[in-house]
Image: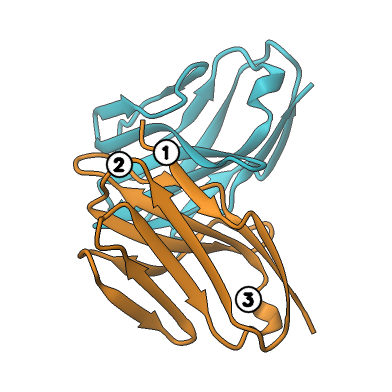
Amino acid sequence: NAGVTQTPKFQVLKTGQSMTLQCAQDMNHEYMSWYRQDPGMGLRLIHYSVGAGITDQGEVPNGYNVSRSTTEDFPLRLLSAAPSQTSVYFCASRYGTEAFFGQGTRLTVV
Amino acid sequence: GQQLNQSPQSMFIQEGEDVSMNCTSSSIFNTWLWYKQDPGEGPVLLIALYKAGELTSNGRLTAQFGITRKDSFLNISASIPSDVGIYFCAGQPYDNDMRFGAGTRLTVKP
């Protein structure tokens, strides 16, 4: 049972580059979300989706785009990477109040 | 937005000691949750609380949903080395996603 799968696990980008962080879940959950984790700040919500075709902004959406064309996939796009986006990114899917997290993507922007 | 204040930020304890950490909010939450994050992994749900005053146990862990609905605490009894990690509280406001505290980093010395 794979649960929530994130790729890649590690990534280094140059300032201004774009990339997509992939997230896939096999639990048929409607609700998916993206968080970033920074030291001393916990997990902050970037974007979330309540189902295919529906997305909304969280606390820190600037610089990120998402789409939800299928129930399974919820990719996060960085349009023009900045050093401030250096962080660990977690994707989660949710059933009721229980969220299931992926293993994270550690992103460094230089 | 909803602010969660989690304390303490870090704890260094001896194996066998009891641990207590808490979370307070400026807003009322409908649900309180406690997660644990092991190094290199995503958070995993430990306990979920749904009613004001609710006290719930999961093995050596006990958590309570405060009467005011603006706070929660987590106790760990008789700590063991595998309790090491970061513990996050999370609150779920109505019709919104979870908001996380900054985390409590627990170190257990054998």
Chain assigned orange: B
Please give the chain letter of the residue carrying mark 1.
B
Front position among marks 3 and 1: 1
Q: Earlier in the sequence, mark 3 or mark 2?
A: 2
Q: Which residue is mark 3?
A: B83
In the rendered view, tell whether residue A15 sits above or below residue B10.
above
- Cβ atoms under marks 2 and 1 closer than 8 Å: yes
Q: Give the Cα separation between the discs numbered 2 and 1.
A: 7 Å
| Residue B33 x %, y % | 37, 60
Mark 3 and 1 residues: CB-CB less than 8 Å, in contact? no
Of A95 and B1, nearer the camera is B1
Task: Using the image, name the chain to which the residue with label 3 belongs.
Answer: B
Which residue position is annotated with label 2? B27
Lower sequence index among marks 3 and 1: 1
Q: Nearer the viewer, residue B56 or A32?
A: B56
Q: Check disc 1 and give the amino acid type.
A: Gln
Q: Position of residue A98 (x, y in %)?
A: 33, 60
Label 1 element class:
loop
- Label 1 sits on residue: B3
